Amino acid sequence: MKIISNETGETIANILTNHSMTLDEALDLVGAEPLEAENSCDPDYILNGVELWYDDLDLVPDNYGKESEDE
């Protein structure tokens, strides 16, 4: 599985797992630090110095997007 940005399609983190999980569980597993957002412009998480907004993230299978790359 991997966490991607819905905005850019960029992979934020790769996760090796043998079961399904929620985006919240995945963010916790990769060490994303939750932030107290005071308004909607503030990030929800920070991971490796990168600010992340929860609504811009998605948890997808490892093969996500491979079909379009092969064409």
Image (tube, grey):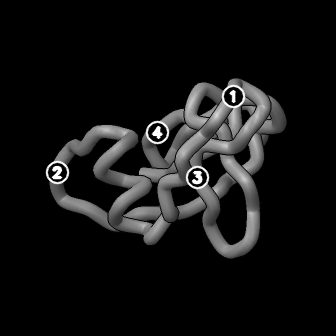
Q: How far is the residue under mark 1 from the one under mark 3?
A: 13 Å
Q: Is residue 67 visible?
A: no
Residue type beneath disc 2: His
Residue 51 left/right relative to 22: right
Residue at the far left: name it: 19
Q: Which residue sits at x=54%, y=46%? A: 36
Helix or strand or loop: what does disc 4 sit on?
A: strand
Question: From what the image shows, is residue 66 above or below residue 46?
Answer: above
The amino acid pointed to by label 4 is Leu
In terms of sequence position, does the residue under pointer 2 or pointer 1 come before the other?
2
**Number of numbered markers:** 4
Report the residue marked by disc 3.
45
Q: Is 54 rendered above or below residue 48?
A: above
How crowded pointer 2 is (Cα within 10 Å; few <14, some 14-19, many 20+) is rated as few
Which residue is under mark 4? 59
Q: Nearer the viewer, mark 3 or mark 4?
A: 3
How far apart are the two marked residues, 1 and 4, measured between alpha carbons? 24 Å
Q: Residue furthest front?
A: 38
User: Residue 17's x, y, as percent?
Assistant: 26, 62
Residue 33 locus on image (x, y percent): 50, 63
Question: In this view of the protein, which residue sits in the foreground, 18 or 30?
Answer: 30
Residue 16 in the image, given as x and y percentages of width and height: 35, 67
- Label 2: which residue? 19
Which is in the foreground here, disc 1 or disc 4? 1
Q: N-terminal of the two: label 1 or label 4?
A: 1
Foreground of the two, 53 or 30: 53
Residue receiving disc 1: 39
Q: Quadrant of the C terminus?
A: top right
Of the pair 47 and 43, the residue shown nearer to us: 43
Q: Nearer the viewer, mark 2 or mark 1?
A: 1
Q: Mark 2 and mark 3: span between their CA atoms?
A: 24 Å
Q: Tags 1 and 3 in contact by the CB under 8 Å rule? A: no
